[in-house]
Image (cartoon, grey):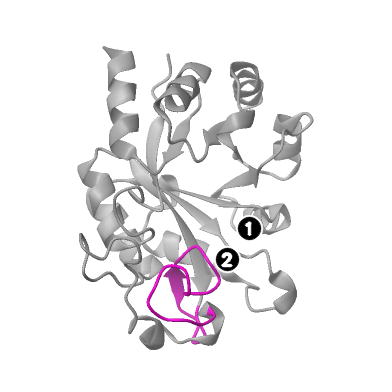
């Protein structure tokens, strides 16, 4: 049975404020092999790690990420929902996360939140982030993903050495062929549409299968049995325990 990687979804976000250094460090303590993060671009061109295009849900501030500078974003507290356990948590830059990944020899899934490319504000974010990954010497430890499959194909053509993945909610017809047509290295499906046969078909075509967001023990076990390459979860400790018990 394959031993899947365990990636903390926005860090160990079941226990700590999502997409913060606190959540990433906790994921490491919980034996995660790495994490999944989301990136946006600031008003002054810095790449920051946050899921939403606004800071309203996860911080004590309000505003659109692309309309605020990094310095302005750093003024707010990103600990919503975890105020007692984590009195302070700031928005990290991609560079900060890459430093942590390098220091601990981790694997990183960078989701590019560039759905709104018609605004023009996200143009080039994929290439800029890939160049940063190359600067850190982490090409072999990073995979990019997006629901914007055009963005991933564009990234692969510009940077062939960078690994890319296609995010999707629904089952794809001949998904492995579709992935190859977009030059993608992996498919990132919602876990509930994954079974052993779809994983095997992908693997036969040389395409990885990384499932998200898998939180219930029974679902984590099902993904291990299905043979996925990575399990993206809010609870790395649970996934680690179940993975190790399967190996015993």
Residue 140 pos. (x, y %) = 42, 45
Please give the label number shown on residue 127: 2
Q: CA distance from mark 1 to mark 2?
A: 6 Å
Q: Quadrant of residue 95?
A: bottom left
Question: Is residue 95 shown left or right of residue 156?
Answer: left
- Compared with 152, 140 (above or below) is above
Residue 42 pos. (x, y %) = 50, 80
Q: In the rendered image, which quarter contains the N terminus?
A: top left
Q: Nearer the viewer, residue 245 or 124?
A: 245
- Compared with 160, 238 (above or below) is above
Whether residue 207 is visible here, answered yes or no, is no
Q: Residue at x 79, y 31 (%)?
A: 173
Label pair 1/2, CB-CB below 8 angstroms: yes
Badge 1 or badge 2: first in the primary sequence? 2
Q: Quadrant of residue 201?
A: top right
Residue 126 highlighted magenta (yes or no): no
Residue 56 highlighted magenta (yes or no): yes
Question: Is residue 151 shown left or right of residue 159?
Answer: right
Q: Which residue is mark 1?
A: 155
- Compared with 198, 25 (above or below) is below
Q: Residue at x 35, y 47 (%)?
A: 14
Q: Residues within 10 Å of mark 1 (few under 14, many from 20)?
A: many
Residue 64 pos. (x, y %) = 54, 80
Q: Which residues are magenta?
A: 42-64
Please give the label number shown on residue 205: none
């Amino acid at each position: 049975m394959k031993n899947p990687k365990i990636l903390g979804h926005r860090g160990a976000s079941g226990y700590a404020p999502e997409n913060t250094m606190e959540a990433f460090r906790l994921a490491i303590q919980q034996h995660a092999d790495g994490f999944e993060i989301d990136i946006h671009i600031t008003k002054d061109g810095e790449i920051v790690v946050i899921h939403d295009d606004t800071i309203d849900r996860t911080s004590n501030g309000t505003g659109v990420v692309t309309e605020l500078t990094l310095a302005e974003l750093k003024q707010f507290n990103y600990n919503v929902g975890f105020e007692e356990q984590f009195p302070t948590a700031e928005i990290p830059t991609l560079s900060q996360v890459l430093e942590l990944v390098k220091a601990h020899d981790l694997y990183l899934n960078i989701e590019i939140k560039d759905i709104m490319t018609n605004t023009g504000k996200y143009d080039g974010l994929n290439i800029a982030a890939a160049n940063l990954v190359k600067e850190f010497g982490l090409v072999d430890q990073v995979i990019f993903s997006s629901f914007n499959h055009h963005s991933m194909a564009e990234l692969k053509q510009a940077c062939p050495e960078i690994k890319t993945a296609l995010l999707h909610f629904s089952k794809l017809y001949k998904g492995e062929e579709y992935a190859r047509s977009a030059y993608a290295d992996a498919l990132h499906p919602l876990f509930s549409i994954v079974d052993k046969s779809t994983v095997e078909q992908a693997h036969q075509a040389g395409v990885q299968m990384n499932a998200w967001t898998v939180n219930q023990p029974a679902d984590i076990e099902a993904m291990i049995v299905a043979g996925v390459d990575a399990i993206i979860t809010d609870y790395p400790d649970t996934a680690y325990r179940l993975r190790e018990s399967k190996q015993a």
